[in-house]
Image (cartoon, helix red, strand yellow):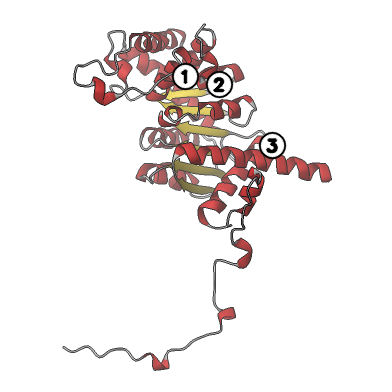
Amino acid sequence: MKLRPIDPSRARTRKLATLSRIVAHQQLATAVPAGASIGDFLTALPDVLAARDLRDLARAIAIARRHRRTFLLMMGAHPLKVGLGPLIRDLIRDGTLTALATNGAAIIHDFELAFAGRTSEDVAAAITDGSFGMAEETGAFLNGAARIAAKEGRGLGEIVGREIAQSKFKFRAASIFAAAFAAGIPATVHVTLGADIIHMHPTADGASIGAGTFTDFHRLAAVAAGLSRGVVLNLGSAVVMPEVFLKALNLARNLGHKVDRFTAADMDFVRNYRPRMNVVGRPTMGGGHGIMLTGHHELMFPLLVVAIREALENSRRRRKKT
C-alpha cells in the first residue's frame, strides 16, 4: 500500500498571543558579575524547573523554621563521606533542622570522623585479605552503643550521640549525632542487619541492634505524626529511608494523626524509584508538595543551605520594613 504524503497547505495557524507558553521573559536568567553575593546568584537563576524547585524548597524550610514546624532530614552515609557534616550540624544548632533519620552506615562514618578525623575505607584494597570493615574501635564503640540502647530502652541514634558527646574524642565536635543530642532533637538510625561493617564484628549483638533501631522506628513515626506544614528531605538514600519513612508515616496516620500539607523532597545524583514514590509521590497525595532535585550532594546541598539562609534573611528584612 502506497502512502500519500500529507498536504499541509490547509493547516490552520493561530496568533502567538492566543497560544499557551510556559516560559516568559521575566523568568529568564540574568548575568552574574564577578564578586556578586550568593543572594545575587540565587536571584539571577532562571525561574524554571530545578532552579524554581530549589528556591521553593528553601522557602518551605525557611517558613518551617520561622513557625517552628518540623524539618526532617533523612539520609544515607554518603553526605557525611563527601563532607557535608558541618552544614548539617549548623542547621541543627540554629534550630532549622528539627529531626534527623539515617541508615546504619551513617553512624559508622559519624563515629570515625569524631574519633579519628577521617573515614571512608578503600574497600578494594582491603576486601582481598578480609580486613575490610574490621576497624576494632568502630565495632567496639557502635556495638557497645547498641547494647546500651537496648539496656536503657532508648533509640540507637540517641545513644550514639550521647556517647560521642560525652567522650573525649579529639574530633567529637564533628559529630552530627552529638550535635542532635546536645540540641535535644530526635536522631534515629534505621539498620538493615548484615548491611553494615560492624555487623561482622565479634562484638555485634543482633538483638541489641534490633531493639535500638526498632525504638528509633517508633520515634520516627512520632516525628512523622507532626510533619503537617513542615518539610521532609531525603538526601541520598535510595532504598532504606524511603521504605522506612513510608511505614512510619502510615503508622502515624493509622493511629489517628492527620498528616498533610507538607513539602516532601528528594535530592540525589540519580533519580530512584523508591524516593520518587515513597517520599515525594505517595505521601503527598491528598495535600502536599513534592520536589525532586538531581545533582551531586557536595554541590546541591550547600546550594540549598545558602538558599535557606537567604530566604530567612529576606524574611527578616521584610518584617523589619513592616
Residue drawn 65% across the image and 27% down it: 94
- Label 2 or label 1, whichever comes before in sequence order: 1
Q: Is residue 280 above or below residue 139?
A: below
Separation of residues labelled 2 and 1 (CA atoms)? 9 Å
Separation of residues labelled 3 and 1 (CA atoms)? 26 Å
- Residue lying farthest to the right in this orientation: 322
In this view, the residue in front, 223 or 166, is: 166
- Label 3 or label 2, whichever comes before in sequence order: 3
Q: Position of residue 288 (x, y in %)?
A: 54, 48
Which numbered tag is attached to residue 157? 1
The residue tagged with tag 1: helix, strand or loop?
A: helix
Q: Which residue is mark 3?
A: 66
Dot 1 alpha-carbon crowd within 10 angstroms: few under 14, some 14 to 19, many 20 or more? many
The residue tagged with tag 2: helix, strand or loop?
A: helix
- Label 3 or label 1, whichever comes before in sequence order: 3
Separation of residues labelled 3 and 2 (CA atoms)? 19 Å
The residue tagged with tag 3: helix, strand or loop?
A: helix
Dot 3 alpha-carbon crowd within 10 angstroms: few under 14, some 14 to 19, many 20 or more? some
Which numbered tag is attached to residue 180? 2
- Residue lying farthest to the bottom in this orientation: 9
- Residue lying farthest to the left in this orientation: 1
**Side of 312 where 198 appears, left or right:** left
Q: Amino acid at mark 2?
A: Ala
In this view, the residue in front, 138 or 163, is: 138
Q: Position of residue 276 (x, y in %)?
A: 41, 46
Residue 156 showing in the rendered view: no
